[in-house]
Amino acid sequence: MYLADDYLIKTGVRDKSEVTFAAPGGVIFGVKDFADTLTGIIDRKKINTRFGYGLERIDGENKKAYFRLLTDTATEPDANKGEVKTDDGLVEVSFDMLHLAPPQSAPDFLRNSKLAIQDGPGKGWVDVDINTLQHNTFKNVFSLGDVAHLPTAKTGAAVRKQAPVVVDNILELLRSEKISDHQYEGYSSCPLVTGYGKMVLAEFKYNNVRDSDPLLSKFMDTSKESWFLWILKKYGLPYLYWNKMLRGKM
């Protein structure tokens, strides 16, 4: 979204364009420090925000998306921006380009197994203790990454912190039939590219508590837009991912 806005400015058509962010949640980001920064960026870029919007269907041929208003406080549609309420209570939004994050789930062999939560908001995800990553029923099973039911963002940065906990607990379980004291506190990281040459690094743990890297925090406020953070995203993080993380070196 932010890069699209930059591109529209560079090509001289931003004043003829509407950029809209629509999401089922009620805020732009769950951690206040980062939400404050992103709200300022959205205001500066004059991006429309539509909160409480749950996508129901897409009419690709006619370039229309249909959203259901999920809460009483959901943003009301604006006819001046191509948004109208339909007879069945949905909001019809016209678009030229739609960028979408589809619904996600664990693979069927896990989702339909006894390892997964059977009912409720966590249905289909592997049922583990959020700190030890040990299964709540089958004590010889551990889970991490995208399939685990953990109340944090599913990112590579999260896996990097989860993997050592799982390894320590498995080794200790084999050695003493007990798990170790090593626990995962929900750390995750979202590199938010807010424009060409600009990035915010959102780091947090459980309960939307900010949890910034102690080294980076000595030199900058990672909740603010930074060229250095963009360089980290463009060059540093890919190197660390391919050469360190995937090889078990960090």
Image (cartoon, rainbow, N blue to C red):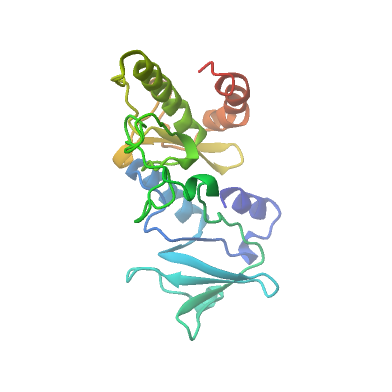
Relative vertical location of residue 151 with respect to residue 11 in this rendering, above or below:
above
x and y, in percent, of residue 17 in the image: 62, 64
Q: Can residue 139 be seen in this view?
A: yes
Q: Residue at x 48, y 77 (%)?
A: 90
Relative vertical location of residue 31 with respect to residue 86 in this rendering, above or below:
above
Q: Which picture quadrant has residue 137?
A: top left
Residue furthest toward the bottom?
A: 87
In this rendered view, identify the residue nearer to me: 127 or 121.
Answer: 127
Residue furthest toward the top?
A: 175
x and y, in percent, of residue 19 in the image: 57, 61
In this rendered view, identify the residue nearer to me: 27 or 38.
Answer: 27
Relative vertical location of residue 110 with respect to residue 230 in this rendering, above or below:
below
Locate residue 82 relative to residue 145 in the image: left or right. Answer: right
Q: Which residue is drawn at 62% across and 31% down?
A: 234
Q: Is residue 201 visible?
A: no
x and y, in percent, of residue 112 in the image: 48, 50
In this rendered view, identify the residue nearer to me: 182 or 5.
Answer: 182
x and y, in percent, of residue 5 in the image: 60, 53
Relative vertical location of residue 124 with respect to residue 74 in this rendering, above or below:
above
Q: Which picture quadrant has residue 208?
A: top left
**How many circles with numbers are drawn on the protein?**
0
